[in-house]
Amino acid sequence: EDFSTEVYFAQKFRAENPDQPIFVVKEAVAGNGIDLELTNGNWNATGGARYNALVARLEFIKLELAAQGITDYNQVILFNQGEADARYNESALRYDDNLYDLISSLRAETFNGQLLIKPDTMWIQERIRPELPDGTYSGYDGAAYVRQGIYTALARDTADAVHAADIVISA
């Protein structure tokens, strides 16, 4: 799999916490939106394929860690999504509600009688990229709405949201 920002995050975390193990779980497929009406809705918490795949991976990792006797660990979710929803103003305008619903649903998921992710799990949301890899502008009409929706959704998730550079951190 291709890795990007999560590798940078893991390296930075490792440098600051050399004695703590770190496990990276990646669920990524380009072009997947949250909005059910105008995108494929694969990240939608009401049965989207990417959402379900992430839940399945988290369940698997939880079992693997428990099998190794690892029960005390921090969880961080690094989420980079939004370009598919930014293609249309209508879906971009709903992005804050759709992202908030996704975060809330994931926080409520249970597995073996326990929350799948811990209540203090940090959610790191990257802003969508305004440029394509070749340096040209993405041209998505709703990019500004999606970027604002990220901030709005995370502010609703917690009063302690911290905004930094091109990422938004919520714990």
Image: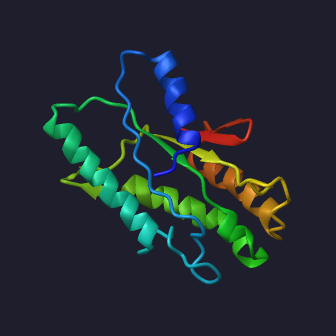
Q: Which residue is drawn at 37% across and 64% down?
A: 53
In x, y percent, where is residue 100?
A: 57, 59
Q: How is the image coloured?
A: rainbow
Residue 118 falls left or right of residue 94: left
Counting the numbered discs, the total is 0
Residue 151 falls left or right of residue 118: right
Residue 140 against residue 124 in the figure, above or below: below
Considering depth in this image, is 170 or 156 the residue closer to the camera? 170
Q: Can residue 87 be seen in this view?
A: yes
In x, y percent, where is residue 13?
A: 50, 25
Residue 102 against residue 124 in the figure, above or below: below
Residue 125 against residue 19 in the figure, above or below: below
In x, y percent, where is residue 79?
A: 55, 50
Q: Which residue is drawn at 57% across and 44% down?
A: 4
In x, y percent, where is residue 140?
A: 80, 68
Q: Which residue is drawn at 63% across and 55% down?
A: 153
Considering depth in this image, is 136 or 106 the residue closer to the camera? 136
Q: In which image quadrant can residue 97 be found?
A: bottom right
Q: Which residue is drawn at 20% across and 46% down?
A: 63
Q: In which image quadrant can residue 161 be found?
A: top right
Residue 170 falls left or right of residue 166: left
Which residue ends up furthest to the bottom in the rendered image? 37
Q: Is residue 94 visible?
A: no
Q: In which image quadrant can residue 165 be found?
A: top right
